[in-house]
Image (cartoon, helix red, strand yellow):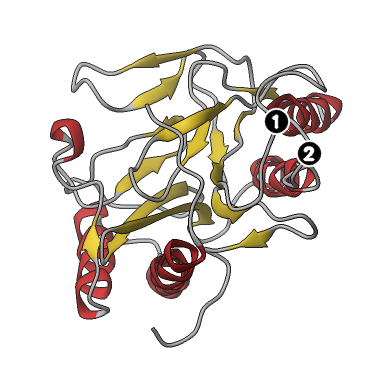
Amino acid sequence: MALYIKSDAEVAGMRIAGRIVASVLKRVAEVVVPGITLKELEAVCIDYIRSAGGVPTFLGYRGFPAGVCISVNDEVVHGIPDSRVLNDGDIVKVDVGVTKDGLIADGARTFFVGRVEPAVVQLVRVTEAAFYEGLKFCRAGFRVGDISAAIQRYVEAQGYSVVRELHGHGVGVELHEEPTIPNFGKPGSGRRLEKNMTLAIEPMVNMGGPAVRTLKNGWTVVTADGKPSAHYENTVLVTDDEPEILTGVVEPV
């Protein structure tokens, strides 16, 4: 993978792609109810992306057979939408990549389906909060390990575990760029961050142990112990000051 420091024009383009991602995720929150199928959720996402002039980045990427990743309960990431029906009490992770005029933004949320057990709600809340712990270090001069360590420290202090086989990454010109951003690590280690780097920060947090395995479809990653997992992701612009969440603004594109 290559590392790209984005020009101001590329950052402007990524803001547009990021707004589409944010709008898609907002639309998912409006329709994710018991009884909807994963394929129906995928259709909602793809229709919105295309109506906004974007392209679903994941479709065909390295052979991935769907336009978005949809993962349920113990599925961590890379779930393939199918005819399964979501039930009351499920959690569902929707991961969306959008390419707009050659530039890419990437984001994910974990949604509640109906009434979810309080312990699982807490897992999802901790996962989102872990993202913001990492975000504190998305500034020029810090290192990748500062982000990673902040996420790990927070998650493990809450009694959960971070997935180690999967990680965040640079994004923008390509879907996966350098640097790799693990959700665990040591402060002060790894590549130093520079202004106009664009990073996909994505804690993947397990209720039980950190071990995962991949299903026979070659894509879907699940927890080894069958316990729930949550995912929260945004594309972030590194600056000399406050980082900018490019997939956090919902407004007309």
Dot label at residue 192 = 1
Gap between marks 1 and 2, in whole Å?
6 Å
Q: Amino acid at mark 1?
A: Arg
Q: Is residue 36 visible?
A: no
Residue at left 47%, top 71%?
12
Q: Find residue 102 and report its horizontal and vertical position in percent.
A: 26, 59
The numbered disc on residue 113 is none
Classify 29 as above or below 209: below
Residue at left offset 73%, top offset 24%: 145
Image x and y of residue 105, in percent: 41, 56
- Looking at the image, is mark 1 or mark 2 earlier in the sequence? 2
Callout 2 crowding tier (Cα within 10 Å): few <14, some 14–19, many ≥20 = some
Is 156 in front, or is 190? Answer: 190
Q: Quadrant of the rendered structure where residue 220 is? A: top left
Marks 1,2: beta carbons within 8 A = yes
Q: Which residue is mark 2?
A: 141
Residue 243 visible in the picture = yes
- Above/below status of 235 relative to 189: below
* Location of residue 25 (image quadrant): bottom left
* 48 and 35: which is toward the camera: 48
- Residue 243 in picture, x, y percent from top left: 71, 57
- Pick the residue in front: 64 or 34: 64
Near mark 1 (Cα within 10 A), the count class, few <14, some 14-19 or many ≥20, is some
Q: Is residue 20 left or right of residue 113?
A: left
Q: Is residue 101 above or below residue 190?
A: below
On screen, residue 72 above or below 160: below
Q: Secondary structure at mark 2?
A: loop
